[in-house]
Every structure is written in C-alpha cells, then in structure tokens.
Image (tube, helix red, strand yellow):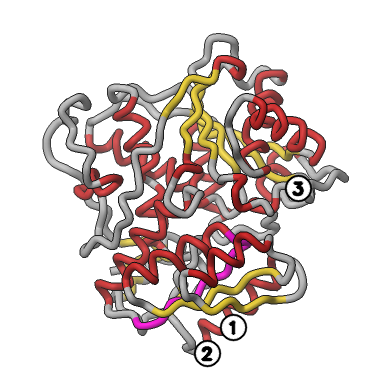
Amino acid sequence: MYACTSCARTYESSPDEPWRCACGHALDFADRPLPDGPAPDPVALDTRPGLWTFSEFLPMEPRVTLGEGWTPLVDAAEWDAQFKLEYVFPTGSFKDRGATTTLSWASQLGVETVIEDSSGNAGAAIATYAARTGIDAEIYVPAAVKPAKRRAIERAGATVVPIEGDRQAVTDACIEAAERGEGWYASHAWNPAFFAGTQTVAFELAAQRDWDVPDAVVLPLGHGTLFLGAYRGFKALLEAGWTTEMPRLLGAQAAGFAPIADELHGPTDAKNDVADGIQIRDPARKDQLLAAIEATGGDAIAVEAEETNAELDRLHRAGFYVEPTSASATAALATYRARGVIDDGDDVVVPLTGSALKMQ
C-alpha cells in the first residue's frame, strides 16, 4: 500500500493506481519493514546476495538482480575522506540500487511496460533491469543526451524517446505519457520502490564500517534519489537499533539548478552546465529533502562549473574515473571545509556516483 505523507491519503499498490497523490505530492510505501534482533556481525555477514543482503529492510519480492551492491569503500587521503565507489555498478552508476528494487516491484505487480525520464544514468539502469526482467521499457531523454548513455539504453532493448528542451521538458513529456496510460511510471524521482533501493547505500556503508556511521556524508543532489535514500537508510538503521547516530547529510547542487541551496542560502548568478546529472530545478520531493537536511543538521550548497571541472581532473589523476556529477560532491566537500561546516578530524564519506565511461 502507498501513502501520502502530505495529506494522508492511501492507495492500493497495483499497476492501475496513481503514481502520485491526488494532492500532487509523491507517494511512499505505507509500511517500511525493519528487522528483528541486533545487527549481525559484519565479518560474518553473507554478502553474496548483493544489496539484497538487507532484504529484511526491503518491501518487495521477487528479486530482479545483476549482482549489484557492496560497492567498495576506500580511503582517499588526498581528500581526508573515504569514497564509496558507486560508479562500479553493472550500468556504471548508483541508479542500479533503485532499478533492481523498482523492477522487482514492477514484476511483482505484473507490469508489462515501464516508462522513465532521465538525463541518462537512471534511464540506462531502468532499461537494463527491465531487460533482465522481460518488461518493455520506454525511456524519455533530452535530445542532447550523451551518445554513450543513449547507446546503453538502446542496447538493452528499450525505446528511446528524445525530447527537445531542458531536463524539465523531458519530465513533462514522460508524465504526460504516464497520464495517458502508456506505461507504469518507473520514475527514479517519484516511484517509492526506487528509494527502497537507494537506502541500501546506508546499510552497506554502516556495515563496511562495523556499524559505525561517519560524522558526515557529502552527496550530489538533484532529485535527491541517493540523498533521500541515504537519509531513510540511516534512519532505518537507527530505528532498528543497529546504529546509534545519524550522520549529517550535505548536498552538492549544480549552480543555476540549485533549488534546495537557493532556499537555504539565496540564489546566485552562476551556472553549472557540466554536472548534467543534477541539473534539476524542481525536485519531486523537495519538502522531504529539506526535512532530511533539517533532521540531520545538514546543508546544501551550489557548485560552479569551474569547481566541478577542477575536481574532475583531480579525481581522474588520482585514479577515480568518474563523471562530473561525482566531482561536484568532492568540490562541495572542499567548500564545506572552508566554511567550517566540516571540521578538521571529522569522519567524512563521499559516494562517487557515476562512471566517466558514459561521458562520451
């Protein structure tokens, strides 16, 4: 069952139910399962099921999987941080976390066709997991989408629907198709099943650190798929009694596409046209993102193109072959330190979210 946290309406979970509430707000699962008992010994934890190791936290079966999950957590001494390498997933981005749970849920509901709008990474993930499931997929993308990302979608057998205009125009076109009944909206911004998957980043991170959470996590922030997922995951761990603290969640937005940072700090005239993965002017769950920031003592800032490019070169020279959106997060890390938001000695993790193999 789905529930609206804004007006408290509820909906049965079926392919024919609305993908958003009648009040316009995003829907969530009415019940979020938690495991019974203490946290398992991380050394003895059987990680062979991938992120489905944490199935007790996940509200869906069956499992549509490509072995995703358990991305490496490595020291990054030059940044005085740890990096979680989310770009080593099967399709090259963290979006596989949400794709495996979303397509598992779609399969459970008996969905025949999914539709999604994306700047590339989410589209490639949904298309790939739809192929794994045997479900048809139509992916709406900007007409100027990077060719490698378009090829990844097409080679998975999905239909690519290119839309002229900005990222919002792509979303609008896909929503119109969803409202015409052309497919089940597998949106990484709206569909609650996607966030059930992205929350697993917190479970893995905590387990890799022997159930000790960092002081802060710095994440790219567009629609907030990973940001909000991390918040829900860390909150679930706390409620289950597996951890004792919440990290501060600190967002990195692209300047000129930074509605959360603008609300917190005021708008700027700068524009970041490099970090295409977070060029979102109207995130579907803006109120939930602001609430997560407030609840964790977090923040969000806008990162300029020059900062992103400089960090991208720095990351590549250090062996982290990521796309610009990831570099925006490490650029934000430097700004947070300069502003005193992150102190010397603070324990910080930065997820690197997408591979540079799809930049061409």
CB contact under 8 Å: marks 2 and 3: no
Q: Is residue 213 visible?
A: yes
Which residue bears the numbered disc 3?
274
Do the numbered discs 1 and 2 sit on residues whose CB atoms are within 8 Å?
Answer: yes
Q: Amino acid at mark 1?
A: Glu
Q: Which residue is rendered at x = 29% and y = 29% of the image? A: 207
Q: Nearer the viewer, residue 6 or 282?
A: 282
Q: Residues within 10 Å of mark 3 (few under 14, many from 20)?
A: some
Q: Is residue 292 left or right of residue 4?
A: right
Q: Which residue is mark 1?
A: 176
Residue identified by numbered label 2: 180
Residue lying at the far left of the rendered structure: 37
Identify the secondary structure beneath mark 2: loop
Nearest the camera: 143 or 321? 321
Q: Measure the C-alpha gap from mark 1 to mark 3.
A: 28 Å
Picture residue at 30% right of the left edge, 67% below the top: 105
Magenta residues (range): 112-120
Element at badge 1? helix
**Position of the C terminus by quadrant:** bottom right
Q: CA distance from mark 2 to mark 3?
A: 34 Å
Mark 3: secondary structure: loop
| Mark 1–mark 2 distance (CA, rounded to whole Å) | 6 Å
